[in-house]
Image (cartoon, coloured by chain):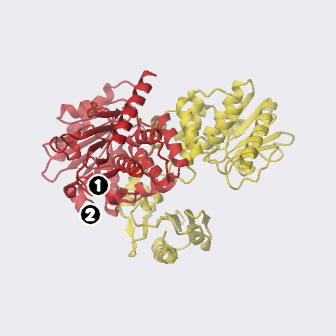
Chain colours: A red, B yellow
Amino acid sequence: MKRQSDLRSSRQAVVRALSGGCSSVFPLHFDPDGDSVGASVALARALASRGKKTWVVSRDPVPAMFEFLPGARDVISLADFHDEFDTLVLVDQSDPGRSGFSPEDVRGKTIVNIDHHLSNNGFGDAHYVDKNASASCEMVYHILRDMTVPLDAELAALLYTGILTDTGSFRYDNTTSGCLRVTSALVRAGARPALLARRVYETRTVGNLRLVGQALSRLHISDCGSVCWTSLTQQMLACTGAQDNEGEGIVSYTRMVAGVEVGLVFKETEDGKTKVSLRSKDRVDVAGIASRHGGGGHARAAGFTLDGPMDLAIRVVVDEVCAAVRGSASP
Amino acid sequence: MKRQSDLRSSRQAVVRALSGGCSSVFPLHFDPDGDSVGASVALARALASRGKKTWVVSRDPVPAMFEFLPGARDVISLADFHDEFDTLVLVDQSDPGRSGFSPEDVRGKTIVNIDHHLSNNGFGDAHYVDKNASASCEMVYHILRDMTVPLDAELAALLYTGILTDTGSFRYDNTTSGCLRVTSALVRAGARPALLARRVYETRTVGNLRLVGQALSRLHISDCGSVCWTSLTQQMLACTGAQDNEGEGIVSYTRMVAGVEVGLVFKETEDGKTKVSLRSKDRVDVAGIASRHGGGGHARAAGFTLDGPMDLAIRVVVDEVCAAVRGSASP
């Protein structure tokens, strides 16, 4: 109960700060995702509907898969932004440095911090940080309710998309009862789940799917049956026409096999190193394995880079992961 | 409002029928899916908790991916069921013939019909048919509330799984505000979204994923860019070790490419014919195309079988589908 009332009063402080300003800038974080775009654009639009001047700016372009979102094409390149403003609103970012604004840029401005990341330390003149929220979009929904902004179908689509993408289509551990209750309200307000899922997930390139295909064709399973891996070479990227970053989702497939506890992708980098991505299902802390090799991540998703060639990396790492599975308790 | 009160009174009639009986049989429909298992087992357990005798029976085995569900291993093979009963409860089936019970078997019994399929004509002594429900599990949730059965974590997991699978992880058009509100309540009662999604979706065979891999490696795009297809041969099934039915989900990938309106899979059958599966995104009615070739389905998902060899089938059908895309209005 304490937590709920603390959250409510921090949210009210944020609403006061937003209402007190006249002109607010919303910088997306670097490499913006659906939650960054959805939450920032929705909140900027809500303030604009109350007569405020607002800009959404971004160092990096909005990814093509989110260009369909209302307002996504109005996002301004950070390099082209030179207007005066009084309030900087950082949504979905625990590190103010990832906004592209330096401390000098924002001296004397009101800084508002709205975020759900565990690592957010509560910086800013007003902050509303809810580490149990599924997405910043879930938090912006509550802000809009406090501001009594009517939720139209466009705002609902923006917020729905952030929750959809940050929960991995309601499959990650952050999918809570509260997040689903908000999602239900967004659909009632006009968000269309099937349409939004198609827009977000059915805009892949042929090159990407062919690369996924080649990677899945060469899946390996360890003798113990608990570890599944595949590998990506520069040659596979070249012959499928996929971009370098288009192999990123492949590791999630390696964990889909029945009985597999850890899935891995080994990727040959342009400079001859081996990038290793790991996902675990229930028991193994892959962040621990990654940190022993100078990498990092979470218990269920981590990564690191090795200097050696891929064949050697596969032999060493698969053995290490098999041992970790053996050492982990059964669920 | 009329519809809501009609639904409520039909649901109350079903609750009265269930409460009036002493011994109820719940036959799963043939080829049972998550919604069939989840809804039937949950309702049978709820009645059992009220002192009724209940059996869940099935002609076909519960698929391996749903064996983890509470009560799934207590499902009895229809062939082994010889007990006396007074009530037959058909959940999630519009055709009583798909229960495995003949009209003679059920003469003199009370028949209860609980279903969300469009084709359900409201048969039975009591029927609760809601064609706007996402899943039969959503309807059983409302029945349990009317019966004031406390929702424990096991019942919640059963009902959540049916909604998850019948909405394609909340991506199909039947994902409504009401379905998400029920889902939120199920999570509050103890259903664990991430765990259940892993149990349902991360239990594939290596052979299945390798087959997906081979199919995606050979994706083709039509010259117009709107049609994407791939093919499955008997040789691919043999060399990946996949079962004959493990190619079924592959057609959904063919529609994931940006700009593609229709995706197809051509599959060589054991007797030398070509099975064609079609999925459309927004505009083309693929059921119309399928029916011209003696097949059928829905506007967005259909299929048919051609007598000729695969190469010829691909040439003819891709041309026909490209013409259908050209003839369809832009969205």
Question: Residue A146, percent across and down?
Answer: 45, 38
Residue A246, numbered circle: 1
Question: Residue A47, percent across and down?
Answer: 38, 48
Is B11 or A89 nearer to us in this picture? Answer: A89
- Name the residue carrying label 2: A241
- Left or right side of A186 for B223: left
The residue sitting at 52% across, 38% down in the picture is A181
Residue B231 lies in quadrant: bottom left
- Left or right side of B61 for A36: left
Question: Residue B84, percent across and down?
Answer: 80, 32
- Establish if B87 lies above or below B233: above
Distance in Å between CA atoms under marks 1 and 2: 10 Å
Residue B205, numbered circle: none
Is A330 or B262 nearer to us in this picture? Answer: B262
Q: Is residue A280 among what the camera can see? A: no
Which secondary structure lies at badge 2?
Answer: loop
The residue sitting at 47% across, 60% down in the picture is B251
User: Residue under mark 2: which chain is it in?
Assistant: A
Position of the C terminus of chain A, as image quadrant, is top left
Categorize mark 1 by other alpha carbons within 10 Å: few (<14), some (14-19), many (20+).
Answer: some
The residue under label 1 is which amino acid type? Glu
Question: Residue A176, percent across and down?
Answer: 47, 35
Categorize mark 2 by other alpha carbons within 10 Å: few (<14), some (14-19), many (20+).
Answer: some
Which secondary structure lies at badge 1?
Answer: helix
Residue furthest to the top: A2
The residue sitting at 42% across, 59% down in the picture is B256
**How many numbered circles does the render carry?**
2
Residue B55 lies in quadrant: top right
